[in-house]
Image: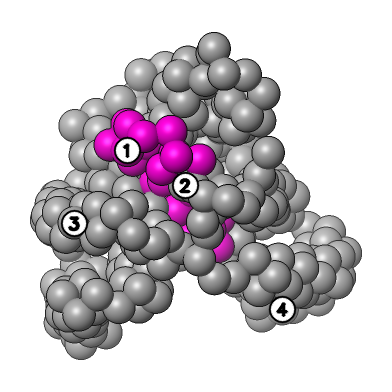
Amino acid sequence: MGLGVDVDLATVWAFIIAFAVFVYVVMDGFDLGLGMLFPLFPKKADRDVMMNSVAPVWDGNETWLVLGGGGLFAAFPLAYAVLMPALYTPMIIMLLGLVFRGVAFEFRWRTQRERNRWDIAFAGGSLLATFAQGVALGAMLQGVHVEGRAYAGGWWDWLTPFSILTGLALVTGYSLLGATWLVMKTEGELRDEAYRLSWWLLIAMLIAIGAVSIATPFLNFEYAQRWFAWPNVLATAPVPIAVAGVTVLLLRALANRQDYRPFFLSLTLFALAYAGLGISMWPYIVPRSITIWQAAAPENSQIFMLVGVAILVPIILIYTAWAYWVFRGKVNAESGYH
């Protein structure tokens, strides 16, 4: 078949993977953020309510991480083969963090004597996983050394000031999602404290977005052209303008103590930041080295997998929406996971 079809399939798969990763970020982000906020809520009753607020949904949120990673392996095998050796260390750290978080979630309900240790594991695992995700993102964005069709960089190339910056930025962003989730799902003093934290975390997230946005164009001249060269600026300018507008709405929602809007506006901030990332990277799947078309699997393989995705993704979306609908509303101390 013609090149046009190849290009279309590669683009379709790029958007499928981008969608899966984004859904993972926004859905697993708030429960990772909630875990990182755990040390700020020392009361056992508060911590129980916090965990009960995500108990029905947290495990299913990671389905999208599997879809994103599996989709990358199947649809863009060259990109997978290059990126994984470059990011082995942060990926292993992320998985270990997710394991600690998941085990702690189950075991803290089974013991009284060791509960504090499992609480530390829950908070530490959440922080470790989030920071590693941000570092991996920064390492990918700054570029990977490729020679021929293989990774040619060193073991520690992923660890740079920029990747540390993106790691800290994601920690801040997930914490904001966690705080606004608590605003939406809890009541009383716990909700009041979540409101207070949301103000500070929003300020911190805006600083982080600004810092990453300023640093990114200096990574590569192509990034600077993509954002600031004429006429590209006409297409990219709406992103920072929208960030400013959403920030105003979020500040107003927090000031008016609206329980639901802050969480969804925080998700919108993430969507805009994600759109900015896409603008910087497109059409590279390995920035500055490999485009989506160069990395794409054979056309027949893409079509075969696309049929499966077309069937499974709507089912997952329907099930996920149903789970959130069933467990909607506020969480109190008397009900929940035991």
Residue of label 1? 41
Mark number displayed over residue 5: 4
Dot 3 corresponds to which residue?
A: 196
User: Residue at position x 24%, y 29% from top?
Assistant: 160
The residue nearer to you, when weighing 140 against 163, is 163
- Is 103 part of what is drawn in magenta? no
* Coordinates of residue 175 in the picture (x, y in percent): 32, 48
Q: Position of residue 80 (x, y in %)?
A: 61, 41
Between marks 1 and 4, how big is the CA–CA gap?
A: 54 Å
| Picture quadrant where residue 100 is located | top right
Between the residue at mark 1 and the residue at mark 2, the CA separation in whole angstroms equals 9 Å
First along the sequence among labels 2 and 3: 2
Q: Is residue 184 visible?
A: yes
Read off the magenta span. 23-48
Instruction: Categorize mark 2 by other alpha carbons within 10 Å: few (<14), some (14-19), many (20+).
Output: many
Instruction: Report the disc number at residue 50.
Output: 2
Residue 333 or 147: which is nearer the viewer? Answer: 333
Q: Position of residue 151 (x, y in %)?
A: 50, 29
From the viewer's perspective, tell me whether residue 263 is left or right of residue 319: left
